[in-house]
Structures are given as C-alpha cells and as structure tokens.
Image: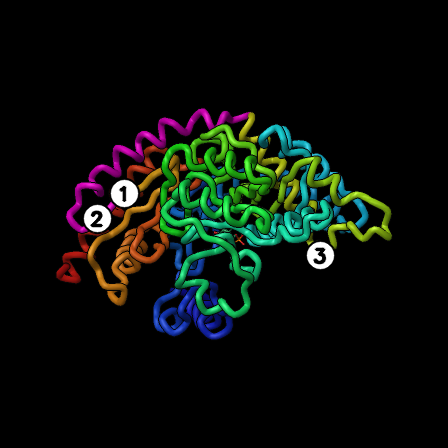
Amino acid sequence: MTRDAKKLKDLDRNLVWHPFTQMQDYQSEEPIIIERAEGCTLYDIDGKAYLDGIASLWVNVHGHRKSEVDEAIRQQLDRIAHSTLLGFGNVPSIELAEGLLAIAPKNLAKVFYSDSGSTAVEIALKMAFQYWRQQDRPEKQKFVSLKDAYHGDTVGSVSVGGIELFHSIFKPLLFDGFSIKNFSLDQARQIFTEHHQEIAACVIEPMIQGAAGMRLQPPGFVSGIRQLCDEFEVLMICDEVATGFGRTGKMFAVEHEGVEPDFLCLAKGISAGYLPLAATLTTDEVFDAFKGAYTDFKTFFHGHSYTGNPLACAAALANLKIFAEEQVLAALPEKIAFLAEALKKFAHHPRVQEVRQLGLMVGIELSGFPVDRRMAHRVCLEARSRGILIRPLGDVLVLMPPLAMSVDQLDTLTKVLYESLEATLTREGA
Ligand SMILES: Cc1ncc(COP(=O)(O)O)c(C=O)c1O
C-alpha cells in the first residue's frame, strides 16, 4: 500500500460519514476506496480489481468510462456545465424530454426533472396531492403503497415506504396511508372500495420490489392495480428508479403488463449511471390541472438548484443513443438466460431459501441465519476479497450487474459468488 493510499483510508474513516453504513463497523474495517474503472471492472487505490456486481448501486448501464458518454459530457462541458430550469430552458434538457417521452408509455407527455430517485417519487406524490386539490377534490390526499416498499429517503418517499429497518425510526415524521400486503389485489380492492374518496394515488415499484430483497409480484398484479386505479379514480405512480432502463429485460418494467401509469419516476440508470439526474413523467391531464392565472396559485412550487442539469442531461442523451444504436435490449435475453442457468446451483443449495430473478435483477435469499450473524454481509466480504464488489440487503445476496456485463463476466460473477458462499459457510461452521 502506498503512503497516499493509507492516508486516504485514514481520512475516509475519520471524515466521511457513509450512507446506510454502521460507521462503528466501517471505521474498524479496511475500506475499499475506488479510484478508477474500465467497463464493468472497478479498481481501488491499491490497484485491486473488482467486478461491479451491483452496477455501482444499480445505476451503471453500459459499463464505466463508456467513450460515447464520456465524450458527450466533455462536449457539453465546453458549452456550459449548469444553468437553471426555474423559468429558463437549456438545450440538453429539452432534447432529453423528447427522447424520454419517445420511449416511455404513450400516455405520458411531460417531464419534470430532479436529481435522485427519492425526489422523483417525492415530486410525483406532491403533484398527485396538488392535482386533486386543483380538481376540487381536496379530500383525496392519502396514498396507497405496498408493504416492504422502498421509494427513497426523503420524508415523503419514506412515508410511502414500508421497510421496518430503515423507516420505523422516522414514523413520527411521516404521513399515514394504506398498505397492500402480499401483493393481494383482493386487499387492494378492499382498500380502494372503502377509502377511494380520500385516496390521491397508489404508488408501486412495478413487477419487482428491489430494496425489499428483489421480491417478485405475481403476474397480473401491475395491470390489476392499473384497473383498480381507473375504476376508483386514483392516480397510479410507478417508481421505476431501479427497474427502468433495461434492468428487467424491457426498457421499463410496466411494459411487461402493457401498463400506462399516470406518473413514471426515473433516476439511477437514466444518466447511464454517470451523474445525478431524475425525471418524473406525467400526463397532459395532470399538467393541465396546474395551469391558470398566476394569481390562481396553481403553480407547482417545487424545484431543485440542479434540476435539469445540462451535463447530466447530456449523459442521459448519450445513454438513450447507445440503447438505440447498440441494440442493448436485444442483447439481454442471452445474458438473462445465462444468469438463470447459473443461478440454478444456488437454488439447490441447502442454505438458500429462494432465488428470485427478473432480467438482470437477482436476489438470493439465505435461510435460517439469525440477524446478528449477518451471513449475507459476510459472504459479500468474502466475495470482495475474491474480486467481486457486491452489497447485500439483509439476508439477501443481490446481483444487479450493468447491462453491459458480458456472459463471461456473468459466469465469473456467479462462480465466485458461489465459492464465496461455500467458503463463508465452512469458515463460520454453518
Ligand atoms: C425503487 C426505488 N425508488 C427510489 C429509490 C431512491 O433513489 P435515490 O437513492 O436515487 O434517491 C431507490 C433507490 O434504491 C429505489 O430502488
């Protein structure tokens, strides 16, 4: 280790507070500090290589240092890095809105930018709330969400979240709503029947709940929710922050069931995993409800300093161009099928409860370990020492590689993970 590397690690331990990380553990462990990357491989400051098994927290799409994205950002930098969208336009944000609407469900007609998945959802919630007030239905102000949902960390998105471990401490800060359990359309119907007069919107992660541990919804669930929303005059918010941009094998997960939501929340992969950017897409009907004389005060009073940042939008435009020119989606079925085959070995493992997969989103749930053993975390540490960078969700090992990961790399990813599982269980006497 060079002296610089040691110094950086000490500074990291002492100065940086890492998200979703118990800093007492972090400060006593050897940190991994990433310095550079090439394709799907990350390199740390000690020169050690890691396969990026979670797409740098579910964001990277075409690999790191993709020359077309790098170049698009450089070219934009020669024009302008940032200007505000509050009352003014900028070129890449306009072109990106056109590009996003061309690939999104056809009913969507407007794009509202922000910077993270949490804000994309927060904005949809606030728009839905304000929409009903401006339709003279102010009593419609509650939200229906799914048990174990994760929609981000701002107070509104936490209010529609349902992961006890992350969310319970904040309960006194949150607004109440209704929760659908076990993806039950019968229970959803009951909630809608009894409470539709007070419900503004229903928010779901369509097809698969990512942070809940890659939980798959039964076929017909997303379209069933759409039908209930139509029947009971409830807006439908689909949070595709994790599932968007090809992760499930289609550009957007709603396409699996031909669903057109009233709001589509996008972030993570939107900028190919390069820069913070998010978008909340909605319909003309919602947009029109916000129009009026200034003194009607129907304006949507929400916006962030970096909303529609030109560098991020330029990266996102390059992302869309790569999807179109490199036929990225057409290359996925082979990778998805390969992964399904490679995962069979895990499914037969006696300490694996269940393997869940949709596209390139995978959860391998370990079985029978007490929480305090943090077995999935231990397996991930072992995998890291063997050159695979992954992060678990509770007892679930998560794989979510960049779409660009080759079949050979997927082979390495799954083989090394299996070896890491075996080595960890042997060492732990489990
Ligand atoms: C479905 C979903 N929604 C929202 C978010 C929050 O996104 P961000 O971390 O960019 O705020 C996430 C993040 O994992 C997510 O998976």
Q: What range is drawn magenta here?
A: 325-354
Which residue sits at x=70%, y=42%?
Answer: 76
- The image shows residue 243 at horizontal and vertical percentages of 47, 41
Out of 103 and 93, give the one closest to the viewer.
103
The type of residue carrying mark 1 is Val
- The image shows residue 172 at horizontal and vertical percentages of 52, 70
Report which residue position mark 2 lands on. 352
Residue 340 quadrant: top left
Mark 2 and mark 3: Cα distance apart in space: 46 Å
Question: Does residue 38 appear left or right of residue 380 in this picture?
Answer: right
The type of residue carrying mark 2 is Val
The type of residue carrying mark 3 is Ser
Which residue sits at x=50%, y=25%?
Answer: 327
Which quarter of the rendered picture does the C terminus lie within?
bottom left
SS at mark 3 in the image: loop
338 within the magenta span: yes
Residue 222 appears in the figure: yes
- The image shows residue 123 at horizontal and vertical percentages of 63, 51
Looking at the rendered structure, which numbered label has been put on residue 355?
Answer: 1
